[in-house]
Amino acid sequence: MNSPSQIVRDATGAVADLVTGMVKASRKPKTVLPAPTEPDKAVPAPSTTKQARLIEMLTRPGAATLTELVEATGWQAHSVRGAISGTLKKKLGLAVTTEVVEGRGRVYRISGKA
């Protein structure tokens, strides 16, 4: 005959096994990453970045308006202005100037190094 303490130990073990099984069953299966692709089959990187496209547009003879820059990058207007002031002016040290051109509005241009 089992003693009361033995019955409690057996019950505790059974409950622990039951909870462990429930926890394991509720876990998500680990996601399996796809095998790395062959180097010759890798997806090519974009030929130009949005920042490079921005610089190219600002250095061309006609320069660029904010609307043209928004359309070319897909960014919102405040993001384009932030890239001009933060990245181009402050980080890259480019001298970005603006002027109002009749018929086009405000035009942004890179005039050289600051």
Image: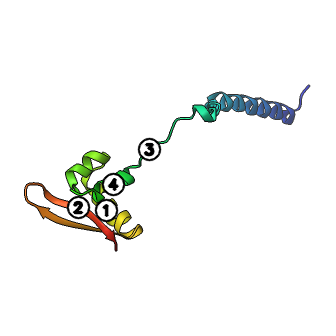
16, 78: nearer the viewer: 78
Q: Is residue 1 left or right of residue 100?
A: right
Give the Cα separation between the discs numbered 4 and 1. Answer: 13 Å
Give the Cα separation between the discs numbered 2 and 4. Answer: 12 Å
Q: Are marks 3 and 4 in contact (CB under 8 Å)?
A: no
Q: Amino acid at mark 4?
A: Glu
Q: Which mark is residue 108?
A: 2
Q: Residues within 10 Å of mark 4 (few under 14, many from 20)?
A: some
Q: Earlier in the sequence, mark 3 or mark 4?
A: 3
Q: Which mark is residue 56?
A: 4
Looking at the rendered image, the quarter that the N terminus falls into is top right
Residue at which label 3 appears:
47
Q: Earlier in the sequence, mark 4 or mark 1?
A: 4
Name the element at disc 4: helix
Q: Are marks 2 and 1 in contact (CB under 8 Å)?
A: yes
26, 11: nearer the viewer: 26
Give the Cα separation between the discs numbered 2 and 1. Answer: 9 Å
Q: Which mark is residue 84?
A: 1
Image height of 60 relative to 12, above or below: below
- Using the rendered image of the protein, determine whether residue 81 is visible from the camera's viewpoint: yes
Give the Cα separation between the discs numbered 2 and 3. Answer: 24 Å
